[in-house]
Amino acid sequence: MTASTRRPTRPPIVGVTATVTRVNDGGPAPIDAAVVDAAYLDALRAAGMLPVLLPPSDPAQADAALDAVDALLLSGGEDIDPAHYGETPHAAAGPFAERRDRWEVALARAAQRRRVPTLAICRGAQLLNVALGGTLAQHLGDDAACGARHDRMADRRARVHPITVAPASALARVLDATSLDVNSYHHQAIARVAPPLTAAAWCDDGVVEAVESHDPAWPALGVQWHPEDLVRDAEPWERRIFDWLRQRVTRDG
């Protein structure tokens, strides 16, 4: 859909990327299932949107997938194969999901081309950056200044470090804040920011914590933390991120 044709009279439909994993559903043998953390879906529904899953598919079908939705959410998950940004894998990188990578790269590029409102979270922010020409730091653990601060899995809702948001950024306007504490569990991070994006937030160790489109016709935000796990907290910041996505659809319509 283009910005000029997105005129939903129903809740905005958001395509949410999903991975495929082997699960045991109680049957005679494990099956391959399309999986996404339900927290993404809950957060979208709480903001008045209707999520639908976009599991890995033929990259040639990316435009057709975006025809069916009003916005795109690139979700978290596996490391991205560094072949997509011209590097060889670090020993600590992986496992990779090549089919998912190719599908989501195609979705991200189509979303930019078609100006589809896009929210990218954790892996999703990294994927958006890679798809548009950026690179990643493959293992923050190699950097003694920051490695341990970003990869903490004990509590998905724990705000483990502060970030600073660029005051002039779109993200600062969305959050109505220029500093906040975030939950964090990632061992990779954005390195060189893709040309269509601008860094919008950083941890005090220099790790990029958010990027955004600098094209006023394409609303796109990528955040390295997990706002979907924090929307029930007392602070309003993470809820505003999902409200922003809904507003981008309704305003464009």
Image (cartoon, rainbow, N blue to C red):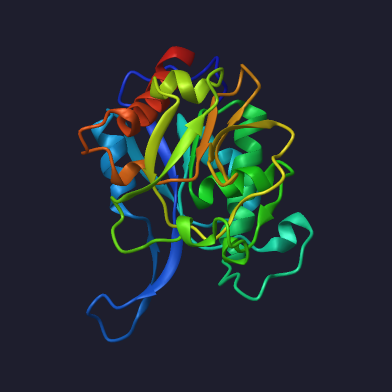
Q: Classify residue 187 as left or right of residue 136.
A: left
Q: Residue at x 64, y 56 (%)?
A: 102
Foreground of the two, 95 or 59: 95
Residue found farthest to the front: 145
Residue 170 at x, y = what percent? 52, 21
Q: Quadrant of residue 3?
A: top right
Number of numbered tags placed on the structure image: 0
Determine whether 171 is above or below 54 in the image. Answer: above
Q: Quadrant of residue 64?
A: top right
Foreground of the two, 209 or 58: 209
Name the image quarter holding the C terminus. top left
Q: Residue at x 34, y 81 (%)?
A: 30
Q: Quadrant of residue 174?
A: top left
Q: Residue at x 55, y 44 (%)?
A: 125
Foreground of the two, 82 or 109: 82
Can residue 12 be seen here? Answer: no
Name the image quarter holding the N terminus. top right
Can residue 96 be seen here? Answer: yes
Determine whether 235 is above or below 6 in the image. Answer: below
Determine whether 8 is above or below 85 in the image. Answer: above
Foreground of the two, 190 or 45: 190
Q: Residue at x 26, y 42 (%)?
A: 42
Residue found farthest to the bottom: 28
Q: Classify residue 84 as left or right of residue 111.
A: right
Residue 60 at x, y = what percent? 66, 49
Residue 180 at x, y = what percent? 38, 34
Determine whether 161 is above or below 19 in the image. Answer: above
Residue 62 at x, y = what percent? 59, 44
